[in-house]
Image (cartoon, rainbow, N blue to C red):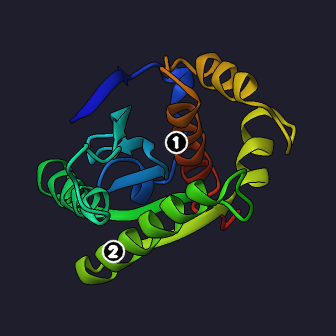
Amino acid sequence: MADTTLTTRIREAMPDLPPAFRADRTLLALDLGTTTGWALHGADGLITSGTVSFRPGRFDGGGMRYLRFSNWLGELDRLSGPIAAIWFEEVRRHVGTDAAHVYGGLLATLTSWAETAGVAYQGVPVGTIKKHATGQGNANKDAMIAAARARGFSPVDDNEADAIAILLWALETRGGVR
């Protein structure tokens, strides 16, 4: 279901972090969408990333993508967790109505799952992520991919690059504290 595209221990990719963020917590960053980008900082300090598709099948009901997303979060928590915190891209404007509906459903599923599991979660504005990754708050998709590659990652698309950027922002700013 989820494709892992990179596991890295490149020194330049991982910033110097306080112990609470470095080795004893599993942290997750998400770029929510039909193709969701994800980046995971494991308890061992290893950063893994990829994409997972929640495109409904031909005979699926309207809620199946959200059920699959919830099950995927549970599986990730069980296999890589426990997840201590989740950061996600907080989108305030969408190009189309369908994208807005999918994002809203995934966000509702994420927050419900996190509340039930007792996992802290926080949205990060799009401009904040882009500015941290590239120096420009309005960076395009190619610039985000290039920024992830410059840090030693190999994202397959902008969804994965955005998730990597969110995770690095969370780690380097201690979740926006500094």
> Which of these two is toward me, 17 or 50?
50
Which residue does the image show at 49% across and 33% down from the upper left?
A: 160
User: Where is residue 134 drawn, in percent x and y?
Assistant: 78, 32
Q: Residue at x 30, y 56 (%)?
A: 65
User: Which of the image's four quarters has the C terminus?
Assistant: bottom right
Q: Secondary structure at mark 1?
A: helix
Hey, which quadrant is residue 150 in on the image? Answer: top right
The answer to whether residue 89 is visible is no
Task: Pinpoint residue 17: horizontal percent, then vertical percent.
Answer: 52, 47
Mark 2, residue position: 114
Label at residue 132: none
Q: Vertical placement of 10 versus 2: above or below?
A: above
Residue bearing the label numbered 1? 163
| Location of residue 8 with respect to 28 vertically, above or below | above
Query: Which percent across, then down, holds residue 121?
Result: 46, 71
Q: Earlier in the sequence, mark 2 or mark 1?
A: 2
